[in-house]
Amino acid sequence: MITLIFGFLRQAIIQGIPLIFGSTGEILTEKSGNLNLGIPGIMYMGGISGVIGAFFYEKYGDVSNVFLCVLIPFLASLAGSALMAFIYSFLTITLRANQNVTGLALTTFGVGVGNFFGGSLSSLFGGSGGTIALNVTGNYFKTTLPFADKLGLFGSTFLSFGFLAYLAIAIALTASLILNRTRIGLNLRAVGESPATADAAGINVTLYKYLATCIGGAIAGLGGLYFVMDYIGGAWTNNGFGDRGWLAIALVIFVIWKPKFSIPGAILFGGLYIIYIYIPEFTGMALARSSQELFNMLPYVVTIIVLCLTSMRKKREQQPPMSLGLSYFREER
């Protein structure tokens, strides 16, 4: 039973890593006052950009060079997802387009681009079968700590992941530190709460919004890279991300806009996401298809409960930024 529990915890962590990337990136974005519902599309774009970078390097480069095999798809993922976030920023910050509509359009666009290149990239460049399998790069991304196997259940549960898993935790903790302990974080939170007041205090509102949104988008895109390279092992599956992008957005509300809480929150969501698989093993009772779908709703149900509780308590530190979703026009202040 203990082995089963630790096995479930390990799988919950695996499922939660993309959510840490996605939620941390969205928290940074929302702290600037931008509500980016394009996170699912950005995660798709981050994944397919990494696949494209790895595809060309495996085709024309030296696959024995571990550093470049990892670095090129990593940088390609950052560039692709940051570009998507930049498009969102230009439309919503400069042109002051509706943030909700723009984000949803970006999601549709990102999923479409990912599915197009994922299904046709190989055949476009002389391959056959229409599938992509980057086994060499995937194995590099999945490389675990060398001493993990020597630490028993603890090592196999908490130390048997690729570097992206630990990077996700480091980014979440760093984002929390920056938001709460630095002048940059204070300025960013001021922009999200009242851009007119921040502008009057000499803070470059447009610059902070652009940087927070683009950096947040790049971080979220790494969640797509993790899913493709580490979780799947270097393969692409159209529509394979499921609803993980939306779960990352829901997680932002669940952790009340605090990046450090994204780590345990993502593991919880990851556990809820797969709990229906383990219930028969824990209880010995098979679940009907309808019951499985009900369990898939659990992360969203928990988010709604947390949203209701925080709304009733009305504590300012547990509420979203006051200007969230609102465009700022300097001449209106």
Image (spheres, rainbow, N blue to C red):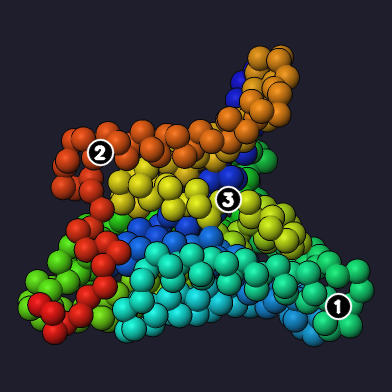
Q: Which mark is residue 310?
A: 2
At label 3, which amino acid type do we have? Asp
State which quadrant residue 11 falls in.
Answer: top right
Q: Which mark is residue 173?
A: none
Q: Are marks 3 and 2 in contact (CB under 8 Å)?
A: no
SS class, disc 2: helix
Give percent across and percent down for residue 132.
80, 68
What residue is shown with label 3?
243
Please give the name of the residue rendered at 53% of the width and 79% of the height, measured from the top-left corner. Answer: 79
Please give the name of the residue rendered at 35% of the width and 58% of the height, measured from the top-left corner. Answer: 27
Disc 1 to disc 3, C-alpha distance: 28 Å
On screen, residue 167 above or below 206? above
Q: Taking the image as drawn, is residue 222 in sight?
A: no
SS class, disc 1: helix
Residue at the outermost right position: 128
Q: Nearer the viewer, residue 313 or 28?
A: 313
User: Which quarter of the rendered picture does the C terminus lie within?
Assistant: bottom left
Which of the two labelled residues, at mark 1 and mark 2, occupies the earlier sequence position? Answer: 1
What residue is shown with label 1?
123
Please give the name of the residue rendered at 30% of the width and 36% of the height, measured from the top-left corner. Answer: 308
Is residue 148 left or right of 308 when viewed as pictured? right
Is residue 297 left or right of 260 when viewed as pictured? right
State which quadrant residue 119 falls in.
Answer: bottom right
Which of the two labelled residues, at mark 3 and mark 2, occupies the earlier sequence position? Answer: 3
Q: How many numbered callouts?
A: 3
Give percent across and percent down for residue 182.
20, 65
On screen, residue 60 above or below 163? below
At label 1, which amino acid type do we have? Ser
